[in-house]
Image (cartoon, rainbow, N blue to C red):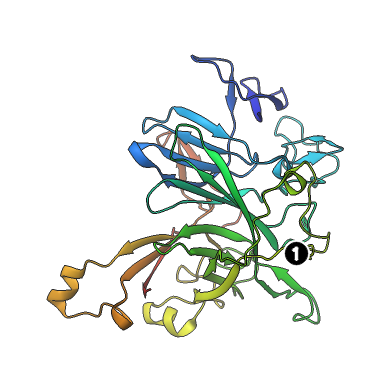
């Protein structure tokens, strides 16, 4: 197994070393851009990483237990070699850009394991790439619609890779083009959450729209649902999981014989009639009631039936269980009054905006 390591010396570029991590203190650390988070059985927790992309398990005290490397097809490559660099230069050398800028295969820059969830019993782990790999539609936003989903059995000490599926992501009109409907962009996903019945919530959205952005109106920001059915193809195979293995064309069209998961639109965050009840809005003035750009989380909490009985509230149509779906936004460190290192270092970004972390709560039943 291979993963990117960084030295304590900031002038030394990243390198790839074996995942055999020795006990004790060393001069090297694993670097992560953490995205997904799931609480495991026995107090441990799992984290998915953007730039590996990898999955890590930690004790409740923050000590790493193990790491999962995905199939070779996911690992970023430039010029035929592993290359974990972003499309940006290191701070110690502004002229040092990766060549080519985009990876030629594997995860695209900043499009790694954005989403992570566990089955309700905690025995299975699911992790999903943010958008299509670069050998099957990426990095172009209009083509990267085929997102892979990995499934692991984590009931034992060592995770076991058991299934792999495809989720075809939705698209939205490209406002930069004259004919917006004919020029559509893929709505990359920001989170998934497994439902008690086995289906999945998925947060798919546009980018570059919202509070603090050039464009204030979002056109796609939704918590949708996808399902793995008996028609969904399990693509786990040496052919598709090999380095540069591809399930789709460079235009994002799936190869013959591959059936994706079923996808259904569900909750529209941008519905003005609902936002207006709370003084919120999508589009218009750049004020604190404008929805933020980056919605990146999903959490499901069952409604307490005892509380419902006392207040006479509904259990949902047909006796279905009711839940609160909670979704938080990322403020992306956009502030003019930030403080780091216990207040010792004052921080202000260059945007001129101050973004609060926002939360939306929906009442749903199924």
Q: Is residue 296 visible?
A: no
Pointer 1 residue: 257
Q: Residue furthest bottom?
A: 273
Q: Residue at x 56, y 77 (%)?
A: 283
Q: Residue at x 34, y 37 (%)?
A: 43
Q: How many marks?
A: 1
Q: Position of residue 355 (x, y in %)?
A: 49, 59
Q: Position of residue 158 (x, y in %)?
A: 50, 32
Q: Residue furthest left?
A: 310
Residue 49 vertical position relative to residue 175 in the rendered view, above or below: above
Q: Nearer the viewer, residue 351 or 110?
A: 110
Q: Residue at x 53, y 57 (%)?
A: 191
Q: Nearer the viewer, residue 117 or 102?
A: 117
Q: Position of residue 313 (x, y in %)?
A: 21, 79
Residue 63 vertical position relative to residue 237 in the rendered view, above or below: above
Q: Secondary structure at mark 1?
A: loop
Q: Position of residue 236 (x, y in %)?
A: 67, 49
Quick check: 248 left or right of 264?
right
Q: Residue furthest front?
A: 230
**Which quarter of the image is occupied by the C terminus?**
bottom left
How many residues crowd around disc 1 within 10 Å: few (fewer than 14), some, or many (20 or more)? few
Q: Nearer the viewer, residue 73 or 221?
A: 73
Q: Is residue 12 visible?
A: yes
**Which quarter of the image is occupied by the N terminus?**
top right
Q: Quadrant of residue 51?
A: top right
């Amino acid at each position: 197994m291979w993963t990117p390591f960084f030295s304590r010396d900031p002038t030394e570029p990243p390198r790839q070393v074996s995942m055999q991590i020795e006990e004790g203190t060393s001069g090297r650390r694993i670097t992560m851009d953490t995205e997904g988070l799931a609480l495991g059985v026995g107090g441990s927790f799992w984290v998915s990483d953007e730039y590996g992309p990898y999955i890590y398990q930690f004790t409740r005290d923050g000590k790493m237990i193990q790491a999962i490397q995905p199939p070779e097809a996911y690992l970023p490559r430039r010029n035929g070699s592993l290359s974990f660099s972003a499309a940006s230069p290191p701070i110690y050398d502004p002229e040092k850009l990766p060549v080519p800028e985009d990876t030629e295969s594997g995860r695209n820059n900043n499009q790694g394991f954005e989403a992570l969830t566990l089955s309700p019993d905690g025995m299975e782990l699911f992790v999903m790439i943010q958008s299509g790999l670069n050998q099957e539609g990426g990095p172009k936003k209009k083509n990267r619609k085929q997102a892979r989903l990995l499934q692991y059995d984590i009931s034992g000490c060592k995770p076991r890779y058991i299934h792999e599926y495809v989720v075809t992501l939705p698209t939205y009109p490209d406002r930069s083009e004259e004919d917006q409907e004919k020029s559509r962009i893929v709505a990359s996903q920001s989170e998934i959450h497994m439902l008690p019945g086995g289906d999945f919530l998925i947060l798919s959205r546009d980018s570059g729209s919202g509070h603090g952005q050039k464009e204030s109106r979002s056109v796609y920001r939704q918590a949708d649902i996808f399902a793995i059915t008996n028609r969904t193809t399990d693509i786990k195979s040496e052919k598709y999981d090999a380095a540069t293995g591809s399930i789709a064309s460079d235009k994002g069209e799936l190869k013959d014989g591959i059936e994706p998961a079923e996808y259904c639109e569900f909750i529209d965050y941008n519905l003005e009639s609902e936002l207006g009840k709370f003084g919120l809005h999508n589009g218009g003035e750049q004020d604190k009631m404008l929805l933020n750009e980056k919605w990146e989380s999903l959490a499901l909490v069952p409604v307490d039936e005892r509380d419902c009985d006392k207040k006479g509230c509904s259990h949902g149509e047909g006796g279905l269980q009711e839940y609160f779906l909670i979704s938080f936004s990322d403020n992306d460190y956009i502030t003019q009054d930030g403080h780091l290192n216990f207040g010792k270092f004052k921080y202000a970004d260059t945007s001129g905006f101050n973004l609060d972390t926002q939360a939306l709560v929906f009442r749903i039943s199924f």
